[in-house]
Image (cartoon, rainbow, N blue to C red):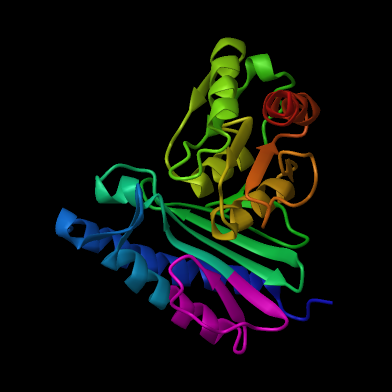
Amino acid sequence: MCDINLEEICHEVMEVARSTGDFILSEREKFSASAVAAKGKHNFVTHVDTAAEKMLVAGLGKLLPGSGFIAEEGTADQSGEDYQWIIDPVDGTTNYIHGLPPFAISIALKHHEEIILGVIYELGFKEFFYAWKGSKAYMDGREIQVSQTSWVSDSLIATGFPYTYFEHLDGFMDSVNYFMQNSHGLRRLGSAATDLAYVACGRFEAFYEYGLNPWDVAAGAFIIQQAGGKACDFYGNEDWLFGGTIIATNEAVSDEFRSIIKKIFIDGQAG
């Protein structure tokens, strides 16, 4: 059993994210391309990512002493047996480098094997999306829900382009071709956390991507579920946190969307 006040912790997490966000935005005003280092082809890290992650680790560590971290930039080495924070200090670093929203802070709290809290702070519009176990989902104090759109043909869909993992590129391009012709449109914003938050509040009906990490999806998928939506991996299973693929949708289009992804990525590639 989780023995902490999750609502109280959630609002404290938001304050940690807010102060870190202020730092990220202030650094953007004096940012230069020379501050960029490459972790891999098209995969960048800035001094801001690293410093922001340290700020989050320090602030969140005070909220739950002894908790561990799964963090993109690897600035924390605490493992934590009961509670682990899963954090991305700047989801959408390439956007940030170019001064292009969205980019977001993503924070989730895992208790043993279960996500119990999620906060996304999108810094372009300064919007907070959040939820905790047993709660509704919220944006800036207002309850949010996934959309009620019933068909993929009426849906606006979000995705992300692969940076380095091109093994499923043929299937991905097939999916782009399909959704361009059979939906209201396909968008690629450059921040998976923001894409997921937008599914939760009904701006998108669905999001799918492969080659992702836990810090990209943990908070957003949880918030979607609390907002009445669904999340799974490309196989329709529950391994969206560590499995590297995710489908996140509203309730109504879930079955249809999953069948399309299965046909394109699983059945299509097997054939």
Q: Give whichever of 226, 28 is nearer the camera.
A: 28
- Is 72 included in the stretch rendered in magenta? yes
**Residue 31 x/y as whole percent:** 18, 58
Using the image as rendered, state which of residue 28 and residue 143 is in the foreground: 28
The residue drawn where x is 38% and y is 46% is: 125
Residue extending furthest toward the right: 1
Does any portion of residue 145 appear in the rendered image?
Answer: no
Q: Quadrant of the N terminus?
A: bottom right
Query: Does the rendering let one see residue 50?
Result: yes
In the image, farthest residue toward the bottom: 66
Relative horizontal placement of residue 29, taking residue 16 as reference (left or right): left
Name of the residue lying farthest toward the front:
271
Residue 81's spot in the image, x, y percent? Answer: 71, 83
Answer left or right for 114 relative to 217. Answer: right
Q: Is residue 141 left or right of residue 21?
A: right
User: Residue 19 at x, y = what percent?
Assistant: 38, 70
Query: At 40% across and 77% down in the image, what residue appears?
Result: 54
Decide if residue 30 is on the left or right side of residue 151. left
Residue 96's place in the image compared with 203, above or below, is: below
Location of residue 163 by image quarter: top left
The image quadrant of residue 197 is top right
At 23% from the left edge and 63% from the top edge, which residue is drawn?
27
Identify which residue, 271 or 8, lies in the foreground.
271
Instruction: Classify 169 as above or below 164.
Output: above
Q: For the C terminus, give its image quadrant.
A: top right
- Residue at image coords 78%, 60%: 134
Which residues make up the magenta segment? 56-85
